[in-house]
Image: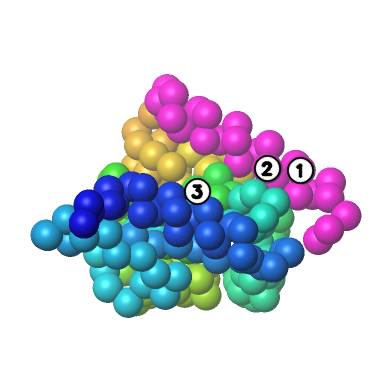
Amino acid sequence: MERLNPKKCFLLVVVAVLFLAPTGSRATIYTYVDANGRLHLTNVPADPRYRPAMQTISRFGPVTTSVGYEDYIRAAASRFAVDPHLVRAVIKAESNFNRMALSSKGAQGLMQLMPDTASDMNVNDPFNPEENIHGGTRYLRKLLELFNGNLKLALAAYNAGPERVIREGNVIPRISETINYVKIVMKHYEQYRNSSSY
C-alpha cells in the first residue's frame, strides 16, 4: 500500500475540517513531524513540538479578532491604565491574535514577549493568554512612563528595545522593521478607536 505524503494528509484533514465545520465554528490546527516522518495533528497541543499550522479557521476564512481575549484585555488595560484599543492594536500587530505565536527570535504568545521581558513582568507561561496580556500591557505601561507618554517612542521601544531608542537620542531608530511596526500599530489603533464594536 502506498504511503501518503504528510503534506497531502495535512491538506486532506484541513479540507475535511473546513467542510464538516458548522457555520461560524473555529479550530486551530497544530502539527509536528516526528523522527520517523509521521505527521501529527491536534487542536489541543500537549507536546511542545506542536506549532500552529493554520490560523484559527472557519468556513469563511481566517478568524483573527480579540474575541475570547476581551476580558483579559479590559482587565489588564484597566489595571495598568493603558487604552484597551492600544492593547488590541499591539496584539494584532504582534501575533494577529494567535496565542501560540512563536517568532524566530524567541518572542512568545499574543503580545510576543521575549523570555527576559516575560520573566521581568512575572509571566510564567507566555502562551497563557491572560498572563501574556497582563505582562505585555504592564510592559507597555512601563515604556509609556519611560518615554513620558510618547506613544510612538514607546511602541518603537516595544519592538526594538528601550535601550536602542534611548541610544538613538529618544527618536524612532532607523530600523525599517521598527519604523513599519510603529506605523502598523498606529493604523490598527486608529481603526479600533473608530470601531463601534468595542
**Relative image position of residue 40 (x, y in whole percent):** 29, 64
**Relative image position of residue 6 (x, y in whole percent):** 29, 52
On screen, residue 47 above or below 197:
below
Under mark 2, the amino acid is His
Q: Earlier in the sequence, mark 3 or mark 1?
A: 3
Proximity of marks 3 and 1: CB atoms separated by less than 8 Å: no
On screen, residue 130 above or below 49:
below
**Relative image position of residue 41 (x, y in whole percent):** 36, 65
Near mark 2 (Cα within 10 A), the count class, few <14, some 14-19 or many ≥20, is some
State the residue position of label 1: 191
SS type, badge 3:
helix
Where residue 94 is drawn, which disc sits there?
A: 3
State the residue position of label 2: 188
Which residue is at the far right?
A: 196
Under mark 3, the amino acid is Glu
SS type, badge 1:
helix
Under mark 1, the amino acid is Gln
| Magenta run includes residue 104 | no
On screen, residue 167 above or below 20:
above
Marks 3 and 2, Cα distance to the nearest angstrom? 11 Å
Which residue is at the far left?
A: 35
- Horizontally, residue 37 falls left or right of residue 197, namely left
Foreground of the two, 164 or 89:
89
**Relative image position of residue 53 (x, y in whole percent):** 41, 53
SS type, badge 2:
helix
Please tell me which residue is depicted at 36% across the width and 54% down the height of the picture. Answer: 9
Q: Give the magenta-colored segment's residue range.
A: 170-198
Please tell me which residue is depicted at 11% across the width and 59% down the height of the picture. Answer: 35
Foreground of the two, 49 or 175:
49
Near mark 1 (Cα within 10 A), the count class, few <14, some 14-19 or many ≥20, is few
